[in-house]
């Protein structure tokens, strides 16, 4: 990159960070909902949201020049084709991810100290918004499950939907707030689903999510101590964060019969950073990995695989755990892939 292009690149990077923070402000003050009601001047929008016009006007300045709102003859508009990425109950809504990013700013001093002194930032340091990342991840994933779990994810593995339709014992490891279990239990009433998570708060929410489903249950427990037998074990975005991923993968293998299936959804990158150059999602995922996955694991003396552990490392670890047949398949989300693992 030439010098002047690099300066422009850094300026665009700063703009992205600043807009991410102000999008969080807009979410928490109700400005996006108010704007979705239709075009408004800054005074009208401030009145709609019950806020001070001077602040709203400056915020709108950032939103318009940042390409999020449009401005026409004094009226600010949040176009519907933009609103669907900031509001609403669909997987297109990126607000949970935007909020997660801006919430990381609070832990940066602890992270910087860990660079120098070692150790890491404990999960308890992330403040109320991120205290239960399982819950926040659930916010992002719940619509993904509703729209894509049955056909997009399960449908990618030949024979899996038929097996679940016939009736199978399924464990969802690191189930978070139970959104995958609830969708699957509804779609496959002949199968039984157990959600397991180490965090009692998210398990409580999971029980609420799957309330009334007779074939769904939840347990608080450590996957590194997994026992029992299941036909299918699923793990959605829950293996790379494990403090002892090697132990967990061996436990998973031990809990499956020889015709069992381990269905793991994780990030879709290479273990070799050089191969990730040019991937438009890589810098974001390395950043999240550093600010959460890696440091929280190091705080517990864990393996700190990080979110960018990559398919090569994943394949090696799955083979070490006793999975001799591993297919890596495309998922409905480009940042994730599916590992269909068989003994
Ligand atoms: C990134 S979240 C994914 C949650 C869920 N699968 C979803 O899609 O919403 C990872 C989850 O793994 C759980 N977890 C981490 N370590 C665990 C362990 N050793 N045993 C069980 N659950 C664990 C966390 O509490 C968290 O809820």
Image (cartoon, grey):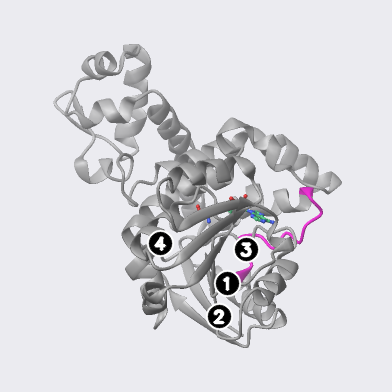
Crowding at mark 2 (Cα within 10 Å: few <14, some 14-19, many 20+): some
Q: Residue at 48% across / 33% down in the picture?
A: 21
Q: Give coordinates of residue 314: x percent, y percent.
A: 63, 74
Q: Residue at 36% across / 58% down in the picture?
A: 186
Mark 1–mark 2 contact, CB under 8 Å? yes
* Quarter of the figure with residue 331: bottom left
Gap in Å between the C-alphas at discs 1 and 3? 18 Å
Earlier along the polypeptide chain: callout 4 or callout 2?
Answer: 4
Gap in Å between the C-alphas at discs 4 and 1? 15 Å
Give the labeled residue for mark 2.
260
Give the labeled residue for mark 4.
184
Looking at the image, the residue that sits furthest to the bottom is 324
Q: Any magenta on residue 61? A: no
Q: In this view, does 286 lie to the left or right of 117?
A: left
Residue 144 showing in the rendered view:
yes
Q: Give coordinates of residue 45: x percent, y percent.
A: 25, 20
Give the labeled residue for mark 1.
230
Q: Nearer the viewer, mark 4 or mark 3?
A: 4
Gap in Å between the C-alphas at discs 4 and 3? 20 Å
Q: Give coordinates of residue 39: x percent, y percent.
A: 17, 28
Q: In this view, does 283 lie to the left or right of 75?
A: right
Q: Point out the image quarter for the C terminus.
A: bottom right
Mark 4–mark 2 contact, CB under 8 Å? no
Residue stretch in magenta? 299-310
> From what the image shows, is residue 4 above or below residue 269?
above
Q: Is the magenta stretch mostly helix, strand or loop?
A: loop
Q: Residue at 64% across / 48% down in the picture?
A: 292
Crowding at mark 3 (Cα within 10 Å: few <14, some 14-19, many 20+): many
Give the labeled residue for mark 3.
239
Q: Which of marks 3 and 2 is in front?
A: 2
Earlier along the polypeptide chain: callout 1 or callout 3?
Answer: 1
């Amino acid at each position: 990159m030439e010098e002047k292009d690099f300066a422009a690149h850094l300026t665009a990077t700063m703009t992205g960070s600043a807009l991410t923070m102000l999008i969080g402000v807009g979410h928490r003050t109700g400005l996006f909902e108010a704007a979705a009601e239709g075009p408004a001047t800054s005074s009208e929008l401030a009145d709609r949201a019950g806020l001070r016009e001077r602040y709203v006007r400056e915020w709108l300045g950032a939103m318009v020049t940042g390409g999020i709102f449009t401005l026409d003859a004094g009226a600010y508009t949040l176009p519907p084709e933009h609103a669907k990425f900031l509001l609403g109950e669909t997987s297109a809504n990126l607000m949970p991810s935007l909020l997660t990013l801006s919430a990381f700013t609070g832990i940066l001093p602890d992270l910087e100290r860990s660079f120098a002194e070692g150790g890491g930032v404990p999960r308890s340091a992330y403040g109320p918004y991120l205290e239960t990342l399982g819950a926040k991840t659930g916010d992002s994933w719940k619509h993904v499950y509703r729209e894509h779990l049955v056909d997009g994810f399960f449908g990618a593995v030949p024979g899996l939907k038929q097996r679940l339709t016939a009736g199978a014992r399924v464990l969802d490891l690191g189930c978070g707030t139970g959104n995958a279990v609830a969708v699957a239990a509804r779609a496959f009433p002949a199968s039984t689903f157990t959600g397991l998570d180490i965090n009692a708060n998210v398990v409580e929410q999971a029980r609420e999510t799957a309330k009334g489903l007779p074939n769904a249950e939840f347990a608080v427990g450590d996957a590194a101590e997994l026992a029992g037998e299941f036909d299918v074990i699923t793990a959605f975005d829950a293996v790379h964060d494990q403090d002892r991923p090697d132990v967990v993968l061996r436990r998973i293998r031990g809990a499956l019969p020889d015709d069992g299936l381990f269905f793991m959804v994780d990030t879709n990158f290479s273990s070799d950073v050089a191969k990730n150059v040019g991937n438009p999602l890589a810098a974001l995922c390395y950043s999240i990995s550093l600010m959460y996955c890696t440091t929280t694991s190091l705080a517990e003396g864990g393996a700190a695989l990080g979110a960018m552990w990559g398919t090569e490392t994943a394949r090696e670890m799955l083979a070490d755990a006793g999975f001799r047949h591993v297919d890596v398949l495309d998922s409905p989300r480009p940042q994730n892939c599916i590992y269909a693992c068989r003994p």
